[in-house]
Image (spheres, rainbow, N blue to C red):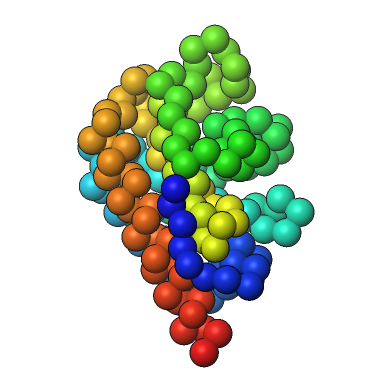
Amino acid sequence: MIHGDVVDGPGARVWDARSEPEVFAILERAALSAAREIGACDLAGIGLVGPGGSTSYVARHATVELLDELQRTLSEGPVVVSERRRPEVVAVADLLDGSQWSSWDDIGVRAYLGFTLFVGGEVAGVLNLYSFEPEAFTASDVAQGLALAEDVVIAIGAALERDAA
């Protein structure tokens, strides 16, 4: 699993630190890196899980913001699955297959790959990758996403430790 080693309520600490310039910059760089470096990734964002399941998103594209808002409003979608079930990786080859999320039809995003970010054993957030093509993500994309998610967890943990010192 993708874990950091920060203790003392780390999920809450990441949530509280999300507006800190250093933590926000880490999250923003990770989303931009994913969109640039992972072959099939057209859009990326990071959702943070806060107290009571509230969420906050880091996204640099209006479509990602729309997807995040849609999922939050309807309480459905692959990110909601990631947050509820807490798997390390969630992959959806075709978001329109079976019309599980029919409200996504008009958005144009077809494939999803998500990586749950665990800090100190708690879910701190999810790295979300989207593609406009169905079945776009490969095993190599999963490996790159896992490596990037691990880097995000380490960077957030280090920032929180510096902040606590």
The image quadrant that residue 68 belongs to is: top right
Asked if residue 109 is positioned above or below residue 18 in the image, the reply reads above
The image quadrant that residue 18 belongs to is: bottom right
Residue occupying image coordinates x 49% and y 46%? 116
Nearer to us in this view, 150 or 131: 150
Image mark count: 0
Residue 49 spot, x, y in % from top left: 62, 54
Quick check: 55 left or right of 89? right
Residue occupying image coordinates x 52% and y 84%? 163
Quick check: 150 left or right of 55? left
Quick check: 53 left or right of 26? right
**Residue ranking furthest to the bottom:** 165
Residue occupying image coordinates x 43% and y 29%? 91
Residue occupying image coordinates x 39% and y 60%? 152
Asked if residue 33 is positioned above or below residue 38 in the image, the reply reads below
**Residue ranking furthest to the right:** 52
Residue 30 shows in the view: no
Asked if residue 26 is positioned above or below residue 124 in the image, the reply reads below
Residue 71 spot, x, y in % from top left: 63, 36
The image quadrant that residue 70 belongs to is: top right
Residue 7 spot, x, y in % from top left: 57, 71
